[in-house]
Amino acid sequence: MAKELKHMTKRAENYSQWYNDLVIKADLAEQSAVRGCMVIKPYGYAIWEKMQAQLDKMFKETGVQNAYFPLLIPKSFLSREAEHVKGFAKECAVVTHYRLKATDDGNAVEVDPNAKLEEELIIRPTSETIIWNTYKNWIHSWRDLPLMCNQWCNVMRWEMRTRPFLRTSEFLWQEGHTAHATREEAEKEAQTMLHVYADFAEKWLAVPVVQGVKSETERFAGALDTYTIEAMMQDGKALQSGTSHFLGQNFAKSFDVTYLNKDNKPEYVWATSWGVSTRLIGALIMTHSDDNGLVLPPKIAPIQVVIVPIFKGEEQLKELTAKLQPVIDGLRELGITVKYDDADNKRPGFKFADYELKGVPVRLAMGGRDLENNTIELMRRDTLEKESVSFDGIVEHVKALLDDIQDNIFHKAKAFRDSHIYECENYEEFKEKVKDGGFFLCHWDGTEETEAKIKEDTQATIRCVPYMFEQTPGVDMVSGKPAKYRVIIARSY
């Protein structure tokens, strides 16, 4: 067993600590010198880069273009949209001065009191305000619409309780912001991006999600509707994994963004915004991984195949490398990422455990006896199954195996999710069962009072009105009133 695994908490003992241990031991991230902020290490960042590359491609296929907007936002901008500022005010980091100076003794620096800004600046918690102030200069006529921009950036939301990837004061994300001529076009765009997120989560991350619309209490500050994808973690808790917002004309009116329609009359534009963040790495870890470490879907794994030659001396290594090089080349020609680990400073057993810990989907190992027998040892990370197979045709075998692993990881997660969705009409029963996790499909009367009581009594929240379940008439289990919706209720991260 690799040294890293000896002190890793088991999921059954303490799921939360297991997650924290795994983030550190798999070399994904670590705490930084800045409270609430993390350092994303190269292996963790490589996962984010693969997510970023695929999402960027999917966005651009819908007509979205990338742009970049300022990190600093004038405080007055946030005041223009009342609901928006109310939602983010407590999380904002504020820049008040623009200069430091040396202390009198020259041993330190301090804020220069003469460098106070005329207007304080907010480090962006999200960019709607600065972007809509910019869009005012870009949009004049119906010919300028739709305008669809995305930016990849960092944001700052001051958090009191932080966890790597799931909730940090600074995090990486993408935020899309679009402007449209009609309400129908904007609503369609918000739904389109929701489906992009769902496709990405399921086909690339192998994370099954429930698509739906948020309750008024849970929607994004300043939105008319918030659409969400909700994933279930192995402890039965929900993780909001992506959101898309129909903003109506709120921001257009706040920043006076109008266009001349085809009749040459001014109208306010309609807006959407949508985003996912490095929180998806947390979803990936908690949906698939096990007590041996990460389990990564091949499509998102930085290293899809690792090849480890087991050798005694330079001559045998040369023989093994000559035999294996065509395999390395053949896999890379298929677009498969391969690492050939011929380092002699670690034992093969240590390497095997380390690559298991890091979730590499397929491991190939070849020693002297394999060389004689024209065989190679193959191990798949998702099931930990190991077998000796013929060396002939190994490239095609591995390609097919990677596809099978991707499918297997998704179907395993989906089977777990589906077996932990419960229909519930009895509040006392719900209060007991929700402690053990799961998604509860319940009738809701549509009132904030009922929603607040559920949260107060159980720490569970309405995750969404789901699209995948039929909306049948019924009675609210809390109030006894006729229900407006069937909703998913769960405890969440």
Image (cartoon, grey):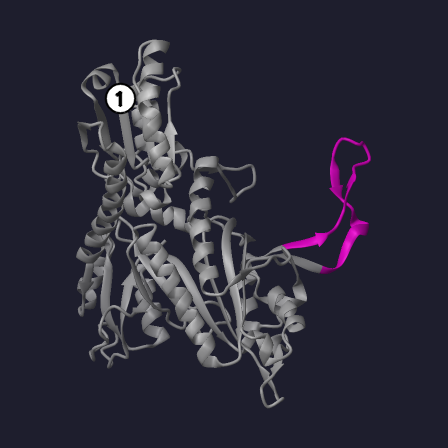
428 relative to 91 in the view: left or right:
left
Q: Is residue 326 above or below residue 74?
A: above
Q: Is residue 6 above or below residue 24?
A: above
Residue 110 on the magenta segment: yes
User: Which residue is nearer to you in this view: 210 or 6?
Assistant: 210
Image spot of residue 379 (x, y percent): 23, 31
Q: Secondary structure at mark 1?
A: strand
Q: Is residue 339 above or below residue 221?
A: above
Residue 56 on the magenta segment: no
Q: Is residue 233 above or below residue 108?
A: below
User: Which residue is nearer to you in this view: 337 or 284?
Assistant: 337
Image spot of residue 225 (x, y percent): 42, 73
Instruction: Tell me the residue at 32%/42% (across/down).
Output: 298
Q: Is residue 299 visible?
A: yes
Image quadrant for the N terminus?
Answer: top left
354 relative to 435 in the view: left or right:
right
**Residue 447 falls in image quadrant:** bottom left
Instruction: Tell me the residue at 45%/69% (across/down).
Output: 245
Q: Amino acid at mark 1?
A: Met
445 relative to 135 in the view: left or right:
left
User: Which residue is nearer to you in this view: 278 or 451?
Assistant: 278
Find disc 1 in the rendering and name its residue: 366
* Few, some or many residues within 10 Å of mark 1 (<14, 14–19, 20+): many
Image spot of residue 60 (x, y percent): 48, 60
Instruction: Tell me the residue at 64%/69% (across/down).
Output: 133
Image spot of residue 285 (x, y percent): 34, 44
Instruction: Tell me the residue at 19%/33% (across/down).
Output: 385
The magenta-colored residue range is 94-119
